[in-house]
Amino acid sequence: MSIRLQNCLAAGATALLSLIGLAAVSFAQDADMAALIEAGKPIYDTNCASCHATNGRGDIGPSLISNGKLRNAEFVVRQITQGGDEMPGFSSSLSDEEIRAVATYVMNSWRNEYGPVP
């Protein structure tokens, strides 16, 4: 086998291993996001649905459906922790992980697809 062919095979093998690694990272991130969404739904139902409705359309609070403001994770977390306008803050009643879960749930429900809160 020529040196050139060996180098091509080695480069191909390295590229394949990199892709496998990226797929594994992507799968882990998807699983993490799915777990956060699953954990966030009951938190939302208990703490948020009375104002934003179970379907996100909003009653007292604004609609969360296709809401472009939700693409900013820092904004979403700040709203949940500190509140704003008529919304109370939840920093004293929810843990950091609960806030991350409910924020991820809101950011990925009702035609929002903004990914997990880091």
Image (tube, grey):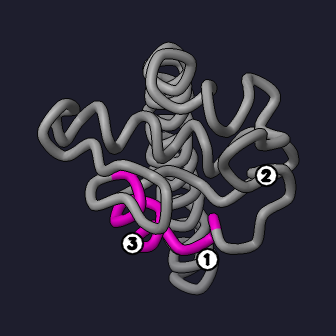
Q: Position of residue 12 (x, y in %)?
A: 61, 67
In magenta, the rendered stretch is 70-80
Q: CA distance from mark 1 to mark 2?
A: 55 Å
Above or below, comparing residue 115 to residue 7 in the picture: above
Tell me which residue sits at (37%, 59%) in the image: 83
Tell me which residue sits at (40%, 35%) in the image: 101
Task: Residue type at mark 1: give it.
Answer: Cys
Q: Which mark is residue 55?
A: none
Q: Which mark is residue 63?
A: 2
**Which element type, helix, strand or loop, lies under badge 2?**
loop
Q: Position of residue 71 (x, y in %)?
A: 63, 70
Q: CA distance from mark 3 to mark 1?
A: 45 Å
Neighbour class for label 2 at 10 Å: few (<14), some, many (≥20)?
Answer: some
> Left or right: where does residue 91 sit relative to residue 27?
left
**Foreground residue, 100 or 46?**
46
Q: Position of residue 40 (x, y in %)?
A: 47, 26
Above or below, comparing residue 112 to residue 43 in the picture: below
Indicate whether residue 53 is drawn in magenta. no
Task: Residue type at mark 3: give it.
Answer: Glu
In the picture, residue 75 is in which quadrant?
A: bottom left
Q: Which mark is residue 74?
A: 3
**Which element type, helix, strand or loop, lies under badge 3?**
helix
Q: CA distance from mark 2 to mark 3?
A: 19 Å
Above or below, comparing residue 46 to residue 27 in the picture: above
Q: Which mark is residue 8?
A: 1
Indicate whether residue 74 is drawn in magenta. yes
Q: Nearer the viewer, mark 2 or mark 3?
A: 2
> Left or right: where does residue 72 sit relative to residue 43?
right
**Foreground residue, 31 or 107?**
107
